[in-house]
Image (cartoon, rainbow, N blue to C red):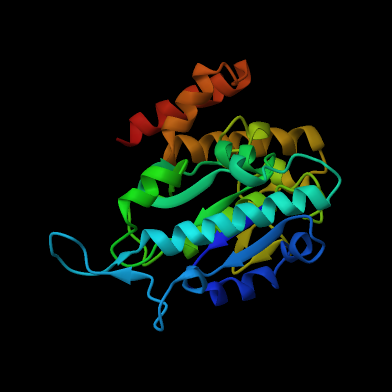
C-alpha cells in the first residue's frame, strides 16, 4: 500500500511516521508514505505556489501549475515503482485516486476506512490558504473527503487521520489481531459503539469494576459487553441502532434489552 502526500508542510508528518504502534507499518514498508512539496515544482526565484484570488477577497489560492507538475512526478514515480516491483497492480500511473480533503467531501466513516485499507493506496492532496484553483480540482481530483462540519488550517491533519485509521487495520500492525474487530463501528459489533473497559485495581477511588467482568463466566461477560454496547449506542448514537435494525443485525435478546432501555428512557423523560 502506498500513499503519496502533496503538502507544503512535509515536516508535519515526520513525528507521526516514527511514533506509536503504526510506525511498524511505515518502517517495514508495509504502508509506504512518500511526501511531495509542490514548492519543489514551482517556477521562478521565489518558487511561488499561491496567488491572489480573481474577483478579490481575503487570503491566497494555491496555484494549479505547481500542483499539476507535482502530480505528474508522483504518477511517474508510482508507475516506475510498479514496473520495478513484482508486477502487482498498486494503482500506479493514471489509475491511482487523487483525494482532496475538503468541506464538500463525503464524511469519512469506518466503512470507507475499511475499504481504503484493502486498496493500493492513493494520492492525498493537502490544501492550504483559501483553497486550490478549481481548475486543478476539476481536472485531477477524483474524490473529496471531509472529517466533519468544521474547518482546519490545512489538509495535513486530515491526511494524518486517514493514514492512522487505515494503517491500524493492516495485518500485524496491532499487537492483537482482533483488537480492531472490537472497535466502535466495526462489523463485529454490527456498527455499534464499543462497550466500557476496565483494568486494575478492582476498586479505584471507591468505584468498583462491574461484577460481571470479575465472574469468570465468559458467556455472562460477553452478554454484559453486548448490552453495554447497546445501551451506550442508544443513548449517544441512536441512528446507529436504526441502521443495525434495518440490516437485521440485532438478535431477539438484543431487542428485548433495547425494549427495557427505551422504557427506562421514557420514564426518565
Q: Residue 20, relative to residue 253: is it above or below?
A: below
Q: Position of residue 22 (x, y in %)?
A: 71, 61
Note whether residue 63 is visible.
yes
Q: Residue furthest bottom?
A: 45
Q: Residue at x 62, y 20 (%)?
A: 253
Q: Nearer the viewer, residue 176 or 143?
A: 143
Image side of residue 70 versus residue 33, left or right: left
Q: Residue at x 59, y 42 (%)?
A: 94
Q: Position of residue 36 (x, y in %)?
A: 57, 66
> Which quadrant of the rendered structure holds the C terminus?
top left
Q: Residue at x 49, y 37 (%)?
A: 233
Q: Residue at x 34, y 36 (%)?
A: 268
Q: Nearer the viewer, residue 258 or 98?
A: 98
Exactly how many numbered labels are in the figure? 0
Note whether residue 164 is visible.
no
Q: Residue 265, relative to residue 28: is it above or below?
A: above
Q: Position of residue 37 (x, y in %)?
A: 52, 70
Location of residue 97 (image quadrant): top right
Q: Residue furthest right?
A: 86
Q: Position of residue 183 (x, y in %)?
A: 64, 45
Q: Residue furthest front?
A: 44
Location of residue 229 (image quadrant): top right
Q: Nearer the viewer, residue 85 or 264?
A: 85
Image side of residue 171 versus residue 37, left or right: right
Amino acid at each position: 500500500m502506498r500513499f503519496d502526500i502533496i503538502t507544503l508542510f512535509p515536516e508535519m508528518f515526520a513525528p507521526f511516521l516514527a511514533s506509536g504502534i503504526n510506525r511498524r507499518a511505515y518502517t517495514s514498508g508495509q504502508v509506504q508514505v512518500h511526501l511531495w512539496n509542490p514548492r519543489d515544482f514551482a517556477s521562478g526565484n521565489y518558487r511561488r505556489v499561491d496567488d491572489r484570488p480573481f474577483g478579490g477577497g481575503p487570503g491566497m489560492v494555491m496555484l494549479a501549475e505547481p500542483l499539476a507538475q507535482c502530480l505528474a512526478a508522483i504518477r511517474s514515480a508510482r508507475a516506475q515503482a510498479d514496473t520495478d516491483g513484482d508486477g502487482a497492480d498498486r494503482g500506479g500511473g493514471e489509475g491511482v485516486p487523487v483525494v482532496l480533503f475538503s468541506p464538500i467531501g463525503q464524511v469519512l466513516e469506518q466503512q470507507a476506512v475499511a475499504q481504503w485499507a484493502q486498496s493500493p493506496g492513493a494520492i492525498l492532496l493537502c490544501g492550504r490558504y483559501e483553497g486550490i484553483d478549481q481548475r486543478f480540482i476539476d481536472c485531477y481530483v477524483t474524490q473529496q473527503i471531509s472529517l466533519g462540519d468544521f474547518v482546519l488550517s490545512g489538509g495535513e491533519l486530515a491526511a494524518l487521520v486517514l493514514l492512522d485509521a487505515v494503517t491500524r487495520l493492516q495485518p500485524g500492525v496491532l499487537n492483537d489481531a482482533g483488537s480492531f474487530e472490537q472497535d466502535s463501528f466495526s462489523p463485529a459489533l454490527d456498527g455499534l459503539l464499543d462497550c466500557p473497559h476496565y483494568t486494575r485495581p478492582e476498586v479505584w477511588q471507591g468505584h468498583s469494576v462491574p461484577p460481571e467482568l470479575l465472574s469468570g463466566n465468559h458467556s455472562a461477560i460477553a452478554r454484559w459487553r453486548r448490552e453495554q454496547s447497546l445501551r451506550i449506542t442508544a443513548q449517544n448514537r441512536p441512528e446507529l441502532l436504526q441502521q443495525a435494525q434495518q440490516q437485521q443485525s440485532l438478535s431477539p435478546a438484543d431487542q428485548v434489552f433495547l425494549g427495557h432501555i427505551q422504557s427506562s428512557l421514557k420514564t426518565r423523560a
